[in-house]
Image: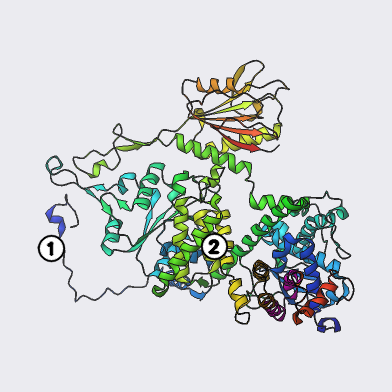
Amino acid sequence: MTEDARRALDTAKLLAARYRAATDRPYLASALYALTVVASAEVPTMGVDRHWRCYVSPAFVDATPVPELAGVWTHEAAHLLRDHHGRADRLPAAAQRDPHRVNVAQDCEINDDLLADGLRLPEGRMEPRLFGLPEGGLFEAYVDLLPPHVRTPDCGSGAHGTPAPWELTGSAGPARLGGAEAQALRRQTAEAMRAHRRARGSLPAGWRRWADEVLEPTVDWRRALTGAVREAAAWAGGAVDYTYRRPSRRTPALRGVVLPSLRRPLPRVAVVVDTSGSMGDAELAAALGEVTGVLREVGIRGNRVTVLACDADVQAVSRVTSAEQITLGGGGGTDMRVGIAAALAARERPGVVVVLTDGLTPWPDERPPCRVIAALIGPGAPQPPDWVETVRVPA
Amino acid sequence: MDGGAGGVPEGRRGRRPRRRGGAAVLSTDRTAPTVVPGPLAAADELNRRLRTRRTEPAANPRLEALALAVTANQPVLLWGEPGIGKSAALEQLAAGLGLPLETVIASVHEPSDFAGLPVVGDDPAVTGVPMAPPDWAVRLARAGTGLLFFDELSSAPPAVQAALLRVVLERRVGSLVLPEPVRIVAAANPPSSAADGWHLSPPLANRFVHLEWTHDPRTVARGMAGTWPEAAVPVVDPGKVPGAVARARGAVSGFLTARPGLVHHIPGDAESRGRSWPSPRTWEMALTLLAAGYAAGAGREALAAALTGAVGDGAGIELLSYLEHLDLPDPDRVLADPDAFALPERGDRQLAFLIAVVAAVQSDLTRPRWEAGWAVLAKAVDAGVPDVAARAATDLAAMRRLDWPVPPGIDGFLDLLQMSGALPGAGR
């Protein structure tokens, strides 16, 4: 044990720094005060674990001025508020193997916002610009772009998810927050940020994005689109009924009774693709791939799926069998009414019509006799009528 | 029923002794045949050895949440990937609650199995075809209680699902009504994972408590070494029932009064509509779960999982925050007797409590109440959280009338305020 390690923790200075951090940014007060202090000589500076316990090195407190300590307090609370340990657990295994690198990426995610917000941080802080990375990103994007073997003072398992040697284990020690309580605290903090923004109008962009995501999580468009198609297919194919045309396979067991068997018609699905060309090839192919993939999964394939390429200029609708056959024209107006009408005019009427479009199109005046799902590709697409189930695909 | 060997000629039946009624009687004085150890005996011994497992007591909020929902007799839907031990958890739970477990694999049945099975009499044209309930339903009805588990619900054809859900929601199998104490749990694969993943229609989804079932790699690794966790199942304490019901009613009703927007809210996307979301029906479920949780002394995490499983993540978490606030000491009562209260353990709740105390002093400003406020803050300083109290102290100090003496407790904050830069120099 060194002389530094035996030194007592200067609690007054440490808590004065927390007080300052909480008064400067009142929306973070609940999160900052939820941290429980544990003095530890082994932690390099300050670190947190999953249970919102904050491990503090006495030597670091002595050597750091209060304004910078306040910045470190905010930094550690940000690791936990942004659920860095939970997100680190979901990283691919290869990225998880180097906790230091994950920690650096997480510090980059936090610090560019803190510095932009005018907070002071000690020397040796990590920022995206040190590695030539753009600001305002998430650590999942940074972690693969960092050089190998980068190091930073360890922020503990509350950040990178790997337990550190100085951390208390089990239920021993001071107050701990459970997962649900931490989630409640995150929501509370996000609400406080919104209230602060309404009252004062100033909130760093990073925190604003975070609060929006906590209160109204964005659903991945792939899940939304496949979910909508799956639900519509189940609805259209839900017409299950008994039929006596083919008796049940259980009939031979019962003398003199004829049991009906079940018949489940599979729905037909038409996919109408807008080729007016104001949208990207990649997004279109991705959306089409998701739709056909989920249809294959629910057993709708072959001649039950029709893909129509709709080109408003020539008012022509052509059947295609693969995404490669779709050629995006340039510019021009779009009229998806033509495509929907063509889909419904087929000899076997589809139960579900999926439209892939940039949304700059007129829609039929009245509701067609089938479910309509629209994947609106690209930003700024106008909202279709209410009877269209809409999934927005960001370009 | 007799062996049912309708077409077996008499001569093939051998010379077994027969009783009236047709069942063969086995003489009871015969000892069990001695098994000659075959080539597989050692292998069987090895398997037996692997099957013996040690258990250690461990907190398992997920299992506790499931036990809570089952105790509260709400229909539960477990969402989880195939093969992560949903059935094993149900066995553990049934053993813990002392219930017989009936597992029905949904995907191998037909809808008619749940509408009753036709039984043929001698002459169907005369006697008709009675519809008999399947044996598992009869066993449950006879026992009067039990745990009914529908596994692989999402792999069954939609018509079977529809028939099954009728069992779950109406508790009827054909013409047989399942007794009230029978608990029902169903399991399904999430739509995003398996090819036969499954979308519930919103009205159906809204009738279940949805619980996510995931595995913990560390637990599995420890289990392979021979030790599995065994969670204690929460049991309702009969003495706590009246108080728990009143407390839960007050909490949910108060919360919905404060947040009327959360009474009913359908999510925007299909994926979320097929899960839990707040509606008057699910709030009713949440109320039952909360009352059962209070009466059984369930853990916070388990209660959180059960409540969010009923009314959805957002509404459930907000309800939990509200409940935490309800647990804070009443500021007016504390100001009346500042020596007899316990400071909350967590800093953020201490802050909420102290802010409430300051607001209470401000709303009715008298000298005794103001001085009681300082006494409360002094307690927070003694507890080692002067920075939490400092915010309240500055507000309290600003309320001082000129003729009131400066309270002694204020010195405890001066150092801290100076260090943090909130006070210039050595202010007095």
Give yes or no for residue B377 being in the magenta stretch: yes
Q: Earlier in the sequence, mark 2 or mark 1?
A: 1
- Helix, strand or loop at disc 1? loop
Q: Residues within 10 Å of mark 1 (few under 14, many from 20)?
A: few
Residue under the image location 71 percent in, 68 percent down: A33
Residue B304's tag is: 2
| Residue A255 visible within the image | yes
Q: Residue lying furthest left in this view?
A: B20
Q: Could you tell me which chain the residue with mark 1 belongs to? A: B
Residue under the image location 58 percent in, 58 percent down: B318
Q: Are dots 2 and 1 in contact, CB under 8 Å?
A: no
Residue A154, image x, y percentages: 78, 67
Name the residue beneath numbered marker 1. Answer: B15
Residue B219's tag is: none
Image: B269 above or below B340: above
- Write the start and end of the magenta stretch as one range: B374-396
Magenta span: predominant SS is helix
In 3D space, how far apart are the residues under numbered discs 2 and 1 (Cα atoms)? Answer: 66 Å
Q: Is residue B301 left or right of residue A313?
A: left
Are labels 2 and 1 assigned to the same chain?
Answer: yes
- Helix, strand or loop at disc 2? helix
Q: Is residue B260 left or right of residue A144?
A: left
Image: B14 above or below A208: below
Q: Quadrant of the C terminus of chain A?
A: top right
Foreground residue among B388 and B136: B388
| Residue B306 visible within the image | no
Question: For the residue marked with disc 1, what is the amino acid?
Answer: Arg
Q: Residues within 10 Å of mark 2 (few under 14, many from 20)?
A: many
Give yes or no for residue A185 being in the magenta stretch: no
